[in-house]
Amino acid sequence: MSKKSSSRTMATKKLIIDEFKRRLRDNIKSLNDNFFHIIQAAKVSPDDNAYKNQTGKMAEFYTTKNEMAVRAQLMVRASDELLRLTTDLKEFLILHDFHFLTHNIKSAEAQCEDELRKQSQFHQAIDSDVSNMLLDLEREIGENFYLRHT
């Protein structure tokens, strides 16, 4: 049962990551395409004879102006989508990476317990050494004190 749910979770994560990749690719493509078309529309035509009257020039000017405004708006929307994607990625990492967090917490707990065990053994060894030294000192003092007063 746990293997089945684990494989489902992995498949779900893979689908979500693929969706993130698709969103990133689409938004970057939109930014690049619209930027390219804005630059292309900004180029000035050196041929003034292409227009018979001023109305044709004005019509092209307003058409180009509106096209550039729409493309700029599309770039803003794509940038906003990229910001949303960043937020979604952060949220995904926080919410779906409990295994990693649990593993790190358990690892830190194990390290702490090992360090505590080592310190406890070190303390017991020092305690034993000090106790042995005290016994030796007491014995030596007892022997020397006894010899002087008899």
Image (cartoon, helix red, strand yellow):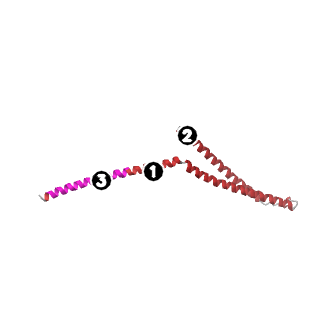
Q: Nearer the viewer, mark 1 or mark 2?
A: 2
Q: Residue 86, percent across and down? A: 61, 53
Identify residue for label 3. 127
Q: What is the magenta segment's predominant secondary structure?
A: helix
Q: In which quarter of the image is residue 14?
A: top right
Left or right relative to 143: residue 64: right
Kind of residue at disc 2: Ser
Identify residue for label 1. 108
Q: Residue 124, percent across and down? A: 32, 51
Kind of residue at disc 1: Ala
Between residues 48 and 76, which one lies in front from this camera angle? 76
Q: Which of marks 2 and 3 is in front?
A: 2
Label 3 vs label 1: CA separation? 28 Å
Q: Does the magenta stretch include residue 71?
A: no
Question: Label 2's element?
Answer: helix
Between residues 67 and 105, which one lies in front from this camera angle? 105
Q: Give neighbour class at mark 2: few <14, some 14-19, many 20+ (Cα, 10 Å).
A: few
Q: Which mark is residue 96?
A: none
Q: Residue 46, percent across and down? A: 81, 61
Q: Residue 40, percent across and down? A: 75, 57
Q: Which residue is drawn at 53% across and 48% down?
A: 98
Part of the protein shown in magenta: 117-146
Identify residue for label 2. 5
Considering only order in the chain, which callout, 2 or 1, is on the residue closer to the N terminus?
A: 2
Kind of residue at disc 3: Asp
Q: Is residue 130 magenta?
A: yes
> Which quarter of the figure is the C terminus placed in?
bottom left
